[in-house]
Image (cartoon, rainbow, N blue to C red):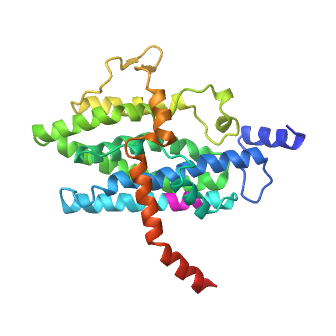
Amino acid sequence: MSAQEQAFLEYVQGGGQVETSDWMPAEYRARLIKFIEMHGNSELMGVLPEREWILRAPTLQRKLALTAKVQDEVGHAQLIYRVVEDLGKPRAACLQDLIDGKSKFHNVFHYPTKSWGDVGVIAWLVDAAAIISQKALLKCSYAPYARIMKKICWEESFHILHGRDVILTMMNGTDEQRTLVQEALDRWWGPLMQFHGNPIAQGDDPSFSWRIKSQSNDEARQQFLDGYVPQIWELGLTVPDPKLRKDEEADRWEYSEPDWAELKHVVTGNGPRTKGRLQLRRTSRAETDWVRRALLAEAA
Ligand SMILES: [Fe+2]
Ligand SMILES: [Fe+2]
């Protein structure tokens, strides 16, 4: 590492923030692009499981709320891709890499949504897991990314309220509705436990060293368990992990080891819905191509 790179590293580790026009090491820029692009991809792909339910939402209010959430998430993708663009990778290239299967998106968005219970669990617990990572990004060393996280976190906290309301309504409904929620929780628990990634020692995690993120994967998972398991239990739901318990003395949750092989398999393009959802993105990109061409012709 050159003296200039070393000084930069010390600057960010000491809490310093970096703007787009500042000098930055090539590795820092490359790490930022990869990290932020995956976040953008996840926002964009994350709407597909929910979009499938807009037409099937049980009431007009639910339909409006779900539509608004989907619009928010697409807006997040747009904001995030613009940050990547300023770092040197155009948004069109991000979208192309996504549909070509060259870049990744979060594991939870590779799975099917089988019932309205899944929609509630996604909005409540998937968004809860996501907001934990996103709140930690408010302290990201790259200032433009940290800044947009304020708006994103505000909207995410609203999504969680919407999800919790869906779940509460179902849990206060019929036995059949309660069963739908429990079945959805059983389906999503594994992916939720994998969501924050396998434990990596902070010293071995370059995203942590460059202070792109400020918490370890395991810390994020502990925070998720701390915040949500008591609420899940309070509703009378069962978490499908017999080993799950809080060790009060150590102030840590114990749990069965998440299936890391499944996580790797899924995020490398082999989830149960990966191919279908990427195909949908490809088709919609082809169908809207004439709009882009017309706008570009107009601009020229
Ligand atoms: Fe989002
Ligand atoms: Fe969200």
**Which segment did they paint magenta?**
77-82
Seen in the picture, residue 205 relative to 89 is either above or below; the reply is above
Residue 84: % across, % down: 63, 57
In which image quadrant can residue 177 be found? top left
Seen in the picture, residue 86 relative to 197 is either above or below; the reply is below
Q: Spot the residue most to the right.
A: 3
Q: Classify the position of the N terminus by image quarter.
A: top right
The residue positioned 49% from the left and 58% from the top of the image is 76
Q: Spot the residue most to the left.
A: 174
Is residue 126 in view?
yes
In which image quadrant can residue 9 be found? top right
The residue positioned 46% from the left and 72% from the top of the image is 288
Determine whether, in the image, residue 252 is placed left or right of residue 207: left
Is residue 154 in view?
no
Determine whether, in the image, residue 122 is placed left or right of residue 296: left
Task: Label the magenta part by its dominant secondary structure.
Answer: helix
Return the residue nearer the eye: 260 or 243.
Answer: 260
The residue positioned 80% from the left and 43% from the top of the image is 8
Residue 281: % across, % down: 44, 59
Q: Spot the residue most to the top.
A: 249
Q: Classify the position of the C terminus by image quarter.
A: bottom right
- Does the magenta portion include 73? no
Residue 147: % across, % down: 59, 55
Residue 238: % across, % down: 25, 27
Determine whether, in the image, residue 148 is placed left or right of residue 239: right
